[in-house]
Amino acid sequence: MDKKSTSKILVGFLFLPASILLAAWSAPVPREKLPFFSVPKISRPPVIDGIIDSEEWKEAVAVSGIGGCTNALLIARPTTYYLAWDSENIYWAVRTWVRPGYKPRVSGREPGSASAFDDGCEFHFKPMGKNIPPGRTDSSYKFMINCLGVDGEMERISVGQQFKNWNPRFRRAVRLTAPGTAPLGGAWWEGEIAASLEDFELVKPNQPGDQWKFMLGFNHLYSGWTQARIPAITSYFDPGGYPVGLLVENTPAIQMLMDDLPGPLDGRATMKIRLYHPGQQKANLHLAVVFTDLGKEKLTEPTKTEPKTILEKKEILSLGPGQTIWWKLDEPFGDKLGNRLATIEVEIKQEGNLLFRYFSYLKQEYPREALQPAGALTQDFPLSATFNPAKSTLFFQADTYYLDKPDTVCQAEYRILPEKGTKPLAEGMITEPRTYYFSRLIQLPQLSPGKYIVQGILRLRDGRTIGPVQTSFTKLDEARVFADWWKTKLGNTERVIKPFTPMQKSKNIVSVWGRNYVLNQIGLPEKIISQGKTISASPARIVVGLDGRQYRFTFLGSPNFTEVKPWRVSFQGQTQAAGIIFKSQGWVEQDGLTYLKLTYQPAENKPVWLRKLSLEFPLSQETVECLLCLGSGGNYASRTTMVLPAEKEGIVWSTLDTGRRGSRMLVGNFYPCVWLGNEQRGLLWWADNDRGWVPQDNFPAHEVERRGKEIILRNNLVSSKFRLDKPRTVIFSYMASPFRPLVKGWRASIWSADGTFEGPHKEVRDPKTKEKIVNGWNWLTPPSRNPAEWGEMWASYKKIADERIRKLQPFDPSGARNGAMVHTSLPLHGYGWKSPDELVTNYFAPDWEGDSWNKTEQDYFLWIAHRAFGEGGLRTIYWD
């Protein structure tokens, strides 16, 4: 296949997620009614202190009235957004009603940790003005700011992908007002935010006429988990149908407020509109407020009667220069509406030009408990104790956030003891708080089966205490309770596994299926041969920068081989250069993966001042046509898939392209996976983490350089001045591709119409209880929460699967392995547990958190997979 064909494949892969991320679910707002705001230029920046001062924000536009994200149905939670701008910044503020006795829930308390499951704001902004840099015209920006002011999920959305390399530095401040300062005895939560041009990656000053699209959302604080926003008509990831904001100056500032309770959902048309005119000439504004009875109870049903206006106000309001006026509405309409669906429309024009538009649906029904006082805490303070049975650790956390005065707590004390004992297994105190909690990971001795008590006390600065609060955990006899799979031998890799072949070693050459590695003194590759062709251009090397000079060391020779088995060859190595000792331990696996633990330390205990320390893998430019770099964890969307520019010399790519946000690192821009190559062969570099590196935000952790006929993959362990005074260890792997031979008949089965996330069963209900299963498609088991029923259900699956294979295999080998019973999908990360056996998943959740695939998780799911293939007739799994 030629280079043109290769680039088409890569581009197709790059654009694949678009149909998923920008799914066309939307609220049923008519597009011609989509909210519109004239966003005024502000003469003086507001003070970002969390206090929405009416004078500071009088020049801003404001809009109230958030509704359900998919139905635009007004909810009984007054929430108002303010927007303004100047040449260098965009300003916005939020005020939302908090019911009496409630403190906003915020689990995200560290930078970058806010999520949709916190009480707080969810935004998605798209700049569309003349200050967008070339190549970014399709970019928009989605992010969270929770009620503690913590940000999170900072994502640039572009061409259907979520890029994690956006790194704004918003100024923000938040506060919760005193009880009783809001209607019905509630409080106001207020937040103020300022964003610079750089925050939204703009290259010129803001100016009148620039357009933005604004999704203004708020999560929680209502009844259960609620996502609400100023009405829009496209999803949370598609800015195409968001309210439009037009930057203006010398234009009246319009603030439409619906912050009174009771309000429209109680049958009262309550609204206040504040108008301020900064211009020099008199302004006449045409105001129209209309409440319409749609004549039906649901949007999806036929209209029973013709829509009818139940309240209408039209006025011309005149404002002189610098004048502020209030227009107020407070009238009942409930007896005219009944249980039918209605709309609210607000429109304000000046000389025929639209300045402001708002539209929402409403019904006179909502969960009344959403406005009632919150219940008191059921314990003195929230205490959690998470026991990890595989590691015998306990994560203790005492939460102070929900106390009236959390800052008065100076320490937390804990005791852990058997239920029927008085002698503590562990006890101590924690004096350094995190953000409103005290926590510690406590190593416990190996515990006997039984129940254990955890006690916690908070000590105040004046010596008083809160608590004790008590919780517990249970240690099971795992070998007895989980005897079917505990420490299973399934998945044993201490053998040659087909289709791989026994490994060979000759001098310093290690051979695996299809590939040969010539290893140097410390296990780096002198030469890599894949499918009979050399892919390395020259030996791998270590580059050391000292005193303004750079030295390249290849360390030719051979490591000390310590183990040679048909499935693994192990080695050790040591050498010295530039005042640094390099020690290595590692091995080559039967699939070609080379694992290397490399320690670098000063020789003779004399510190070395490094300017640079890099690992370089020079590759043949005949081999390297394409590059793939993947983000970590759930950040697969932050990836680079590219064809390297053929003529460009020097640096052709680096991880600065996708940055720290994309890598999800607090410092630096380390990525776990880089591959270079073509369709025939290539080299994969991989590492779990950047332990032992000296990360820098402004220097790339990884980069690719074209130098003559070499394409160099470079890992920059040290990028700036650093005093090396003790050993540091890095761990990484490299592996030549292709990794394994293609399966027999691969041309007939390389594609897969697998019906991803379909699951091995056709229905997501328990066949006996008829219980609706949430995320049942994600299970590798049959759809029953009772493991005793799995065998019988798998047997029924096997009959269907075997018959399908018998009929289709001779004629459609790929299609025969697709569909329910024969094929399943299994996400490796996220989407909930892969089994409905809650005894197992609840007990081992601390060890499996984030789908760690630790030994216990591997053993359990290998056992289930073994049964699914054997007893259930399963033929293929789509790993996501």
Image (cartoon, helix red, strand yellow):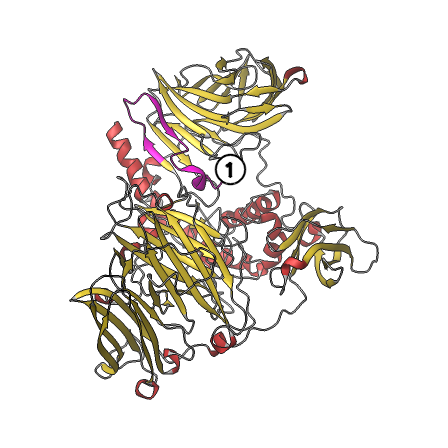
Q: Is residue 247 left or right of residue 734?
A: left
**Quadrant where the N terminus is found in the figure:** top left
Give above or below for 403 relative to 209.
below
Would residue 646 be counted in the magenta stretch?
yes
Q: Quadrant of residue 134?
A: top left
Where residue 77 sits: x, y (%)? Answer: 43, 71
Most extreme residue toward the left, as rendered?
352
Q: Quadrant of residue 599?
A: top right
Q: Choose between 384 and 173: the one closer to the eye.
A: 173
Where residue 383 sits: x, y (%)? Answer: 66, 60
The boundaries of the magenta stretch are 641-667
Would residue 297 be counted in the magenta stretch?
no
Q: Residue at x 47, y 40 (%)?
A: 632
Where residue 746 sits: x, y (%)? Answer: 35, 36
Where residue 387 sits: x, y (%)? Answer: 67, 52
Q: Which residue is tagged 1?
A: 667
Q: Is residue 756 visible?
A: no
Most extreme residue toward the right, as rendered?
422
Q: Choose between 263 and 787: the one closer to the eye.
A: 263
Q: Quadrant of residue 273?
A: bottom left
Most extreme residue toward the bottom, as rendered?
335
Q: Is residue 423 visible?
A: yes
Q: Residue at x 49, y 65 (%)?
A: 766
Q: Choose between 527 and 89: the one closer to the eye.
A: 89
Near mark 1 (Cα within 10 A), the count class, few <14, some 14-19 or many ≥20, is some
Give above or below for 485 relative to 27.
above
| Callout 1: SS | loop
